[in-house]
Image (cartoon, rainbow, N blue to C red):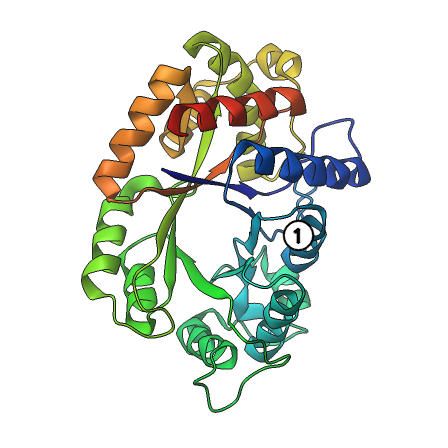
Amino acid sequence: MKLGVLDQMAQPKGVSAEETAARTLELAQFVETLGYERYWFAEHHATRGLASSSPEIMMAAVAAKTKKLKVGSGGILLPQYSAYKVASHFLQLQSLFPGRIEAGVGRSTGGNERIRSLLADGKPNQADDYPEKLADLAAYLSKKGKVRATPRTEASPELFSLGLGENSALLAAELGIGYVFGHFIKPDRGKEAHDTYRTHFKKGYLNHPEQRSAIFIICGETDEHSEELASSQDIWLLHVEKGFDSRVPSVEEATSLRLNKKEQERIKTNRKRMIIGGPAKVKRELTELSERYQCDDWLILTNIYDVEEKKRSYVRIMELFS
């Protein structure tokens, strides 16, 4: 099993953005010592509790603080930006950290229409142009492209498209690039997406298919302990979806809240996006999911309040599969 981290830089209540950034660098160094292969950053805007708004900068910061850890973006909001400029960012990073850069992009708008417009400098929504922009990005990064972005590094970073189903998987397959399925967002089409990607992959930017999945995992000492830890993530995610204060609450605050029936049902539904349990349960469920998806490469999100408990969760997960 290949394991990595996808970090949204979820900010705990009472912790500043500066402290969150410092903790992130520390966590990346820590998981490298455990044997995790990669550390990716999401891109979010106008969400108070998510401090990762510039994956490229965080990639550089983490790469500079680590030795072998691969760093990536999961993912840059390609529809809002120039594909050429995005390619230049990735190639600049590749020149600084050869062989350690993984370029992940997605179709998301990054927020509401106002935020999307600000990111795109007032340009119309370009989400429908994503396939064309993705093809352009692959060309600008590739030595085979008619126009290549600079700096012209000896090797190109690996390129991945993020998605939630068969359509996104087919696009990645036809372009011959890597694919990452967002189980942590919409888990219902995972098997179909991975099957589509493998079946239709054509040699292109990559010589062979590279597939991954991203998922929320909390591994406690026991199932009961994991449920306690997960309470902060449950409420955090509920608040993110409602547009409330999306900083991560403490376990004490999360468990003290009185939830109505609709909120309880939403938390139950959101649990399909996660694996929550002690070591035996986590190993069983991730192994079963890997077999179902035919995917043994995972990016793990753990958005709980206590940073030390987060570290211990990552330790337990690695011990299960090392």
- Left or right position of 305 against 197: right
Question: Which quarter of the rendered picture does the N terminus lie within?
Answer: top left
Query: In this picture, is 204 found above or below 116?
Result: below
Looking at the rendered structure, the kind of residue marked 1 is Ala
- Residue positioned 47% across, 14% down in the render: 227
Query: In this picture, is 30 found above or below 75?
Result: above
| Total marks placed | 1
- Left or right position of 271 against 7: left
- Residue positioned 74% across, 37% down in the render: 20
Relative image position of residue 182 (x, y in whole percent): 40, 47
Residue 261 picture quarter:
top left
Residue 169 picture quarter:
bottom left
Relative image position of residue 232 (x, y in whole percent): 58, 22
Q: Secondary structure at mark 1?
A: helix
Front position in the image: 209 or 121:
209
Query: In this picture, is 110 found above or below 287?
Result: below
Relative image position of residue 176 (x, y in whole percent): 33, 70
Question: Which quarter of the rendered picture does the C terminus lie within?
Answer: top left
- Left or right position of 216 against 229: left
Q: Which residue is mark 1?
A: 63
Query: In this picture, is 72 found above or below 125?
Result: above
Front position in the image: 138 or 181:
138
